[in-house]
Image: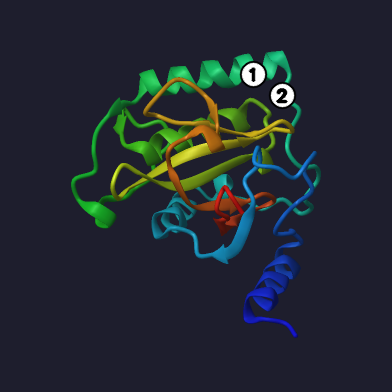
C-alpha cells in the first residue's frame, strides 16, 4: 500500500527526473539524508524570480557528491573567507517581509552570504548539484541559511558565522530543509542525524 508521502515523492521525482536520495559513495552520518519533499522558502521563490539563472534545473542529473581535491578544498576555503569578509553583516529587522536574498550586496544577512557563495562557486565551475542551500535553526529559534557542499567524504557547511568549514553533523544546528540535488527549485526535509 502506497502512502501519500510515497506517492508525492514519486510524483516529484517523475516531474524532475531527480531521485529523493541520489547515490552517494556511502550511506552514513557524513551525508545528509533527505526525508520528505517540502516547499521551498517563499524568499527562495522570490530569489528565483530575481535571478532565474541561479535556479535553473539541469536537463539531466549527472553524478552525485563531488571529489574534493586539495585545489578544490583550498578554493572553497578562499571563497568562504572572502565572502564572509566582503559582505558587512546586517540583521534583517523586518522579518519575512524583509527577506530579499541578494547576490553580492555590500551589506546583508545569512541568506545573502549563502547565495553569494553558491553563485561564486558555480561561476568557478563547481557543479550546482553539489551546492545546496539549507535552512537550519540556530540558538533557541532563529532560522538561518547556510550553503552545503556535497563531497564524497561528507556534506560540508559554509557559514557566515564562522570561516571554519565543518561537516554538517558537527554543527549544533537543527536541520530543517535543503535543496534537492539536480532539482534546485525542489526542497526536502532533513532526516534526524540519529535516524
The one nearer the camera, 104 or 149, is 149
**N-term mark: 2 or 1:** 2
The one nearer the camera, 147 or 42, is 147
Asked if 1 appears above or below 146 in the picture, the reply is below
Q: Residues within 10 Å of mark 2 (few under 14, many from 20)?
A: some
Query: x, y (%) of residue 162?
Result: 40, 24
Residue of label 2: 68
* Local secondary structure at mark 1: helix
Asked if 80 appears above or below 97 in the picture, the reply is above
* Local secondary structure at mark 2: loop
Q: Which residue is drawn at the image coordinates 44% and 51% (left, top)?
A: 47
Q: In the drawing, does residue 123 fall left or right of residue 176?
A: right
Asked if 56 appears above or below 148 in the picture, the reply is below
Q: Which residue is drawn at the image coordinates 79% and 48% (left, top)?
A: 23
Q: Quadrant of residue 186?
A: bottom right
Residue of label 1: 73
Asked if 153 appears above or below 33 in the picture, the reply is above
Amino acid at each position: 500500500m502506497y502512502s501519500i508521502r510515497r506517492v508525492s515523492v514519486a510524483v516529484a521525482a517523475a516531474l524532475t527526473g531527480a531521485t529523493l536520495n541520489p547515490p552517494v559513495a556511502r550511506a552514513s552520518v557524513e551525508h545528509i539524508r533527505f526525508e520528505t519533499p517540502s516547499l521551498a522558502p517563499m524568499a527562495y521563490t522570490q530569489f528565483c524570480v530575481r535571478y532565474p539563472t541561479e535556479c535553473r534545473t539541469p536537463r539531466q542529473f549527472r553524478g552525485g557528491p563531488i571529489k574534493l581535491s586539495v585545489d578544490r578544498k583550498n578554493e572553497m576555503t578562499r571563497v568562504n573567507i572572502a565572502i564572509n569578509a566582503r559582505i558587512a553583516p546586517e540583521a534583517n529587522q523586518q522579518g519575512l517581509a524583509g527577506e530579499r536574498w541578494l547576490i553580492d550586496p555590500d551589506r546583508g544577512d545569512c541568506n545573502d552570504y549563502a547565495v553569494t557563495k553558491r553563485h561564486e562557486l558555480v561561476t568557478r565551475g563547481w557543479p550546482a548539484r553539489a551546492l545546496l542551500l539549507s535552512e537550519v535553526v540556530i540558538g533557541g529559534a532563529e532560522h538561518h541559511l547556510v550553503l552545503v557542499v556535497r563531497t564524497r567524504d561528507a556534506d560540508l557547511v559554509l557559514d557566515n558565522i564562522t570561516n571554519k568549514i565543518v561537516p554538517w553533523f558537527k554543527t549544533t544546528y537543527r536541520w530543517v530543509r535543503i535543496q534537492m540535488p539536480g532539482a534546485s527549485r525542489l526542497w526536502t526535509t532533513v532526516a534526524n542525524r540519529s535516524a
